Image: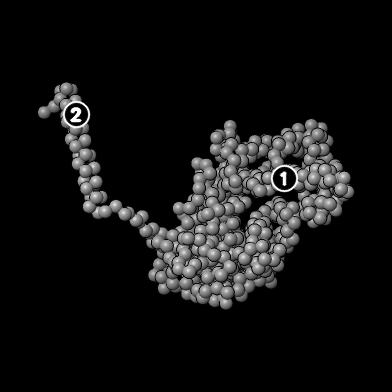
Amino acid sequence: MARAAKNGSKTADDKKKNGNGGPLGFEAQLWAAADALRNNMDAAEYKHVVLGLIFLKYISDAFEAKHAELDAQRAQGADPEDPDEYRAQNIFWVPPEARWSYLKSMAPQPTIGQLVDAAMEAIERDNVILKGVLPKDYARPGLDKQRLGQIINLVSDIALGDDAARAKDTLGRVYEYFLARFASAEGKSGGQFYTPSHVVRVLVEMLAPYKGRVYDPCCGSGGMFVQSEAFIRAHANGNGNGGKAKADISVWGQESNYTTWRLAKMNLAIRGIEAQIAHGDTFHADRHPDLKADYVLANPPFNDSDWRGDLLKDDKRWAFGTPPSGNANYAWVQHFIHHLAPTGLAGFVLANGSMSSNQSGEGEIRKAIVEADLVDCMVALPGQLFYSTQIPVCLWFLARTKKNGRFRDRRGETLFIDARKMGTLTDRVHRELTAKDIETIAGTYHAWRGDPLLPPPPAGEGRGGGYLDVPGFCKSATLDDIRKHGHVLTPGRYVGAAAAEEDDEPFEDKMARLAKTLREQLEEGRKLDAAIAANLRELGYGG
C-alpha cells in the first residue's frame, strides 16, 4: 500500500470537490481525529471505531431523509414512525436511541461509548440482515470517550446517506481514503483498498452483467456488485436486457479481512442487494467451491507475497501451472478461470507486471493460458488512477469460449487496447477516467465482439458499426502475433504508433514557411553571437 501523506493543513487540492475521483476535503480532518485514538489502540482496532461510526451516520442520514418525507405526508396518512414504511424502500429502520441526532447531542457525555454500543445493538435487533455485522465495542475502558465524542462531531458535518451524497459516492470515497490510511498504518501490501468507481465502471461496462451469477472472490467493500446493479438499472429500459425492469442476477463473494467483510455486508444491505458474501481466505478456505459463475469481477491484492502458496502446491485450481509462492497474481488468475461457467467471462485488475513477468514460472503459466485461447482482451490503463497506490495497472478479460452464437467468432484472436493516454487529472497526483473514456474503451470491445445490443463509439468502429483497428489505440491480434512476442500481453507491443494528424497545407507552402522561419532564426543567432563577442571584447577577452 502506498504511504499516505502526512497530516497537515489542507491544500487547494485537498479542498477540491470532484464527481467521483479526488479528495473531498474533509477526509484529512476525519483522519486527524481518528489518528488521535492511536494513543490508546493500534490501527487494526481503531478502524472498527471510525468506519463503524461512518456507516452508522450513513444509515441514519438515509433514515432521516425518508423520515422528513413521511412527516410531510402525515395528512395523507403516512406515519414516520412505522418501520415498514422504511423497509418497503430498502431503508433501514433506525430506532430513536440509534438516531444520529440523539448520539450527537450526547457526544460530550462520558457515557457516549455505552450509547453508541446500544445504538448498534438496536439497529441489529430491528434489521436482521445486519445481525452480527456492526461493531459494538465503544464502551471499553481503553477508548478515550472525549475523542470518541470529537469524532462523532466531525462525522456529523458530513452528509453520507442523502440522495446527493449517494450520487457523489461520498461514502465510498471516504471509505477509500480511510482504508488507504489504515492499510498504510498497518503496513499492508498494495492493492488492498477500495477500487475507484470509474475503474469498476470500465469492467462492468465491458462485461455487461445483465443476468446470471456474478462472483468476486476478493470483494472488499462490495463495489463491483454495487456497480453491477447500477449498470442494470441504467440499461433496464434500454436495449441491454430487453427492457426488463430488473435482470435475473445473483451475487456471490468472499472477503478474507473480517472488518472489510462486515463493511461489504453493510454496503450491500444498505443498497438492498441480496448477496451470498462469505468470510474467509479464498485460497485456503474457498466458501463457494462448486460455484461456476457467469461473470467474475475482481480487484485482487497486487503482487501478494504472503498468500501461503507453498501450502497449495497440488491444488486442483492450478490447471495451467503452479503459481509462485512469492506472488499470488497467477493464483488469482487461475482461481477466476476455475470458477467460470462454460460461457463465462472474467474481468479483473492486475499490476502491469502480470502481462510480461517471466519470474518463477509466471511466463509459462501465462503462455499456457494464452495457448488455451482464454485471453479475450487486455487493456493498459493510465497511471495515477488509484487514490491509495501508484502501482500501474491493467485490465484482463478472459473468456471460457470465444464462439458464442450471439457474438462474432473470435477464436484465436485477442483484442489489445492501449488506454494509457486517457483520463483527466483531478489534482496533481490523481487521474480519473471520464464517461467518454469508459464509453470508448467498452464500446470498442463490444464492437470487436460483435455485440448487436451495445453500439460502438467512433474509436474502433468500422463500416456498418463493425470493428476496425486504430493505430496507437486498439489491435485485434492473432495467436501467432502473440507467440511472436513471447506471449507477452502488453498492449503497447501490438497497437503500434498512433497515426499522424493529417495536414492539408500544400507541400510548397509548408517548405516556404519553414525555410523563412529557419532564415529568421539563423539571423537572430548571428546577432546574438555578435553581441556576445562585443561583450567579451569589453571585458578584455576579445581577439
| Quarter of the figure with residue 140 | top right
Which dot marks residue 311? none
Identify which residue, 298 or 381, lies in the foreground. Answer: 381
Q: Amino acid at mark 1?
A: Asp
Residue placed under numbered mark 1 in the picture: 162
Label 1: few (<14), some or many (≥20) within 10 Å? some
Identify which residue, 248 or 194, lies in the foreground. Answer: 248
Label 2: few (<14), some or many (≥20) within 10 Å? few
436 above or below 37? below
2 or 1: tag closer to the N-terminus: 1
Mark 2 against mark 1, which lies toward the viewer? 1
Q: Secondary structure at mark 2?
A: helix
Q: CA distance from mark 2 to mark 1?
A: 70 Å
Res 97 visible: yes
Q: Residue at coordinates 64% horizontally, 69% vertically from top-left?
A: 294
* Residue 334 falls left or right of residue 360: right
Q: Amino acid at mark 2?
A: Ala
Residue 109 percent across, percent down from the top left: 81, 32
Q: Secondary structure at mark 1?
A: loop
**Colour setting:** one colour
412 above or below 489? below
Res 126 visible: no
Residue placed under numbered mark 2 in the picture: 531
Residue 19 percent across, percent down from the top left: 60, 46
Q: Residue at coordinates 52% horizontally, 70% vertically from top-left?
A: 450
Identify which residue, 242 or 13, lies in the foreground. Answer: 242
Residue 91 percent across, percent down from the top left: 78, 51
In the rendered image, the quadrant that contains the C terminus is top left
212 above or below 126? below
